[in-house]
Amino acid sequence: MNDLVRVFRFGWPYFRRYWSRLTAGILLGVLFGLSNASFVWATKTLITRMSPEPSARKIDKPQPSAGALKVRLEER
């Protein structure tokens, strides 16, 4: 931890001139990330709204015929 304090003391005179640029860079980076995330969300929302929902069809369960039951019983 002592070395970290020494490094900051050494760099502070150089850093002091550019702290506003660093702050602006961090804020703009966060804004860029949020805009990309919102673009992905908006694209997903548009795709789900424009694609038709699959209709739920009622599929009747096939009724086995008497012959099929007889064949199954004979196989055992």
Image: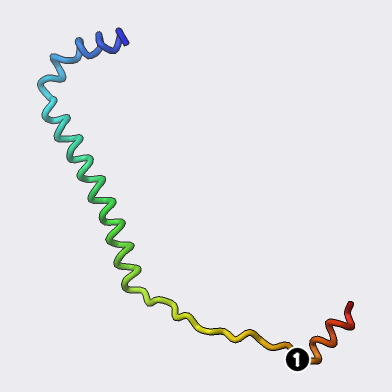
Residue 55 left/right relative to 18: right
Asked whether 4 or 64 is in front, the reply is 64
Give above or below for 39 relative to 10. Answer: below
Q: How is the image coloured?
A: rainbow
To which residue does mark 1 refer?
65
Residue 66 at what x, y percent from top left?
Answer: 79, 92
Estimate how packed mark 1 is, as few (under 14), some (14 to 19) or many (20 or more) residues with alpha carbons within 10 Å. Answer: few
Asked whether 33 or 55 is in front, the reply is 55
Residue 64 left/right relative to 2: right
Q: Disc 1 marks which amino acid?
A: Ser
Give above or below for 1 relative to 27. Answer: above
Q: Quadrant of the N terminus?
A: top left
Number of residue marks: 1
Asked whether 47 or 58 is in front, the reply is 58
The quarter holding residue 46 reads bottom left
Q: Quadrant of the C terminus?
A: bottom right
Residue 73 left/right relative to 56: right
Residue 17 at what x, y percent from top left?
Answer: 10, 21
The quarter holding residue 39 reads bottom left
Which residue is depicted at the point 33% across and 68% down? 47
Which residue is depicted at the point 19% across and 14% down? 11
Residue 74 at what x, y percent from top left?
Answer: 89, 83
The quarter holding residue 9 reads top left
Residue 63 left/right relative to 68: left
